[in-house]
Amino acid sequence: MDNRDQGRTDGDMPAIAPPGEAPTDWSVLPVVHGSEDSVVMVLWRLLRQEPALIVSAGYVLLSLLGLWSSYFFYLRFELSILDYLQISDFLVAGLRDPAYAVILGGGIALAIVVGWPDTLRRRNPAKVEALRARHWGWRIVFSRTPLTSWDVSGMRPLTGLCTAVAFFMALGAAIYSLDKAEGIRNEGRGNRVTVQLTGDAAALKGDARLLGSSSAFVFLWWPQQHRAEAVPISAIKRMQAAVVVPKAVAAPKPAPAAR
């Protein structure tokens, strides 16, 4: 033994990791192994071969999300929005509200977080089994339930994750649209406009709420009559945002004169 090592104790020796123990992989990205033949991977390989299709696929996805949201929004006003849309309206339905992009990102983030226990279990099977044997809380987190594992659903992990993303997006868009519609119907929210039709000398009485528009129609809500209508754009001569007059600020009372 070297003389330099004679004065060392066991506590001074550097710690050596046990052989065969791999470091924990905390990645939140879904596990691709085992999903090579899934529809999602086939589509992903196609998109990698043709990167220009990524923009087109994202555009189509946003358009579908916009149509879905528009259906629930106008349903609260008893308007069948699909009957008033042209082909061009289907292409821009998802670009009318930036909230759709937020819903898309939120759905992806939520699905990844919910599926993270299953991802950790697949990446670190030995470490997860050790945690499950240590405490009942870990057994609940890493249990194989529909909320934490795709094995119960019978779907491949990547397919299950994408299905969850689509479900969260659809649910979030529907809730957002219904809440927005309720705010206009019951709380007086929305853009207030005055409308003058072609051939009329003056604008229609009352302030309408502008619900939206398509390539051929403008959709209005009249709070006084509690009625929604679709007005052809060709029939509108002028539409102007209603001016909201601020409440007058009360003038301060003059200070009493000194006696």
Image: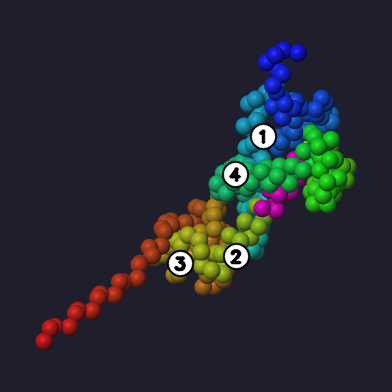
Q: Which mark is residue 182?
A: 2
Report the predominant secondary structure element of the magenta stretch: helix
Whether residues under marks 3 and 2 lie with C-beta atoms below 8 angstroms apart, the answer is no
In the rendering, at what x and y percent does residue 67 appear? 65, 49
Q: At 25% across and 75% down in the image, what residue appears?
A: 251
* Label 1 Cα neighbours within 10 Å, binned few <14 / some 14-19 / many ≥20: few
In the drawing, does residue 54 fall left or right of residue 188?
right
- The amino acid pointed to by label 2 is Glu
In the rendering, at what x and y percent does residue 196 appear? 43, 61
- The amino acid pointed to by label 3 is Asp
Name the element at disc 1. helix
Residue 166 forms part of the magenta stretch: yes
- The amino acid pointed to by label 4 is Ala
Q: Magenta span covers which residues? A: 159-172
Q: Quadrant of residue 120?
A: top right
Q: Which residue is mark 1?
A: 57
Q: Which residue is mark 3?
A: 207
Residue placed most toward the observer, 157 or 95:
157
Q: At 57% across and 44% down in the image, what residue appears?
A: 95
